[in-house]
Image (tube, rainbow, N blue to C red):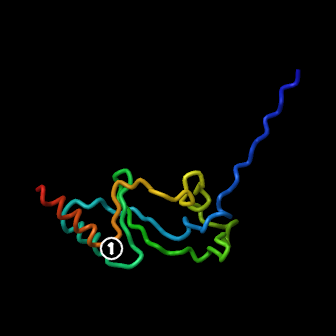
């Protein structure tokens, strides 16, 4: 009795259906703030357009809205074959295409939002 061959189903890439969301920002880790002076430094980031701050699994990041210069009008990569390693390793199983809530521990898009957090945090001390 012959054993049926299992066909490998190639997962469809989401990139052609996406607006290139992962190519429209840069997120970089920053030092975890410990005192008012550290938080004031973070307020400086938020005073700039296109910047936000998020905390994910206890790690702090500055998020900069900036479109990759290699993203073409069809939202595809113009240098796909020679794209940077970080792009090659990015997987679309949990990418920005899925949208919705990223589940950040904390998120700040304005100095006012961070000021509220700072006031609450330091009022307990």
Q: Residue at x 29, y 69 (%)?
A: 42
Which quadrant holds residue 17? bottom right
Q: Residue at x 62, y 75 (%)?
A: 70
Quarter of the image where the C terminus is located: bottom left
Q: Depth check: give the residue in front, 112 or 122.
A: 112
Tag 1 secondary structure: helix
Which x, y percent locates residue 120?
18, 60
Quarter of the image where the N terminus is located: top right
Work out whether 74 lies above or below 101. Answer: below
Which x, y percent locates residue 111?
28, 72
Which x, y percent locates residue 50?
42, 76
In the figure, is residue 42 to the left or right of 1?
A: left
Which x, y percent locates residue 81?
70, 65
Work out whether 73 lies above or below 35. Answer: below
In the figure, is residue 68 to the left or right of 101?
A: right
Q: Residue at x 60, y 55 (%)?
A: 92
Which quadrant holds residue 88? bottom right
Specify few, some or many for label 1: CA neighbours under 10 Å numbering under 14, 14-19, or 20 or more: many
Judging by the rendered image, the residue that carries numbered circle 1 is: 46
In the figure, is residue 111 to the left or right of 87?
A: left
């Amino acid at each position: 009795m012959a054993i049926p061959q299992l066909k490998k189903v190639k997962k469809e890439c989401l990139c052609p259906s996406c607006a290139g969301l992962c190519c429209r920002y840069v997120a970089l880790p920053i030092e975890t703030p410990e005192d008012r002076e550290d938080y004031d430094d973070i307020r400086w980031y938020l005073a700039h357009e296109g910047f936000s701050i998020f905390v994910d699994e206890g790690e702090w990041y500055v998020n900069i809205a900036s479109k990759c210069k290699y993203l073409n009008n069809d939202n595809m990569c113009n240098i796909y074959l020679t794209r940077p390693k970080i792009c090659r390793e990015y997987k679309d199983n949990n990418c920005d295409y899925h949208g919705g809530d990223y589940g950040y521990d904390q998120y700040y898009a304005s100095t006012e939002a961070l000021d509220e957090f700072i006031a609450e945090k330091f009022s307990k001390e």
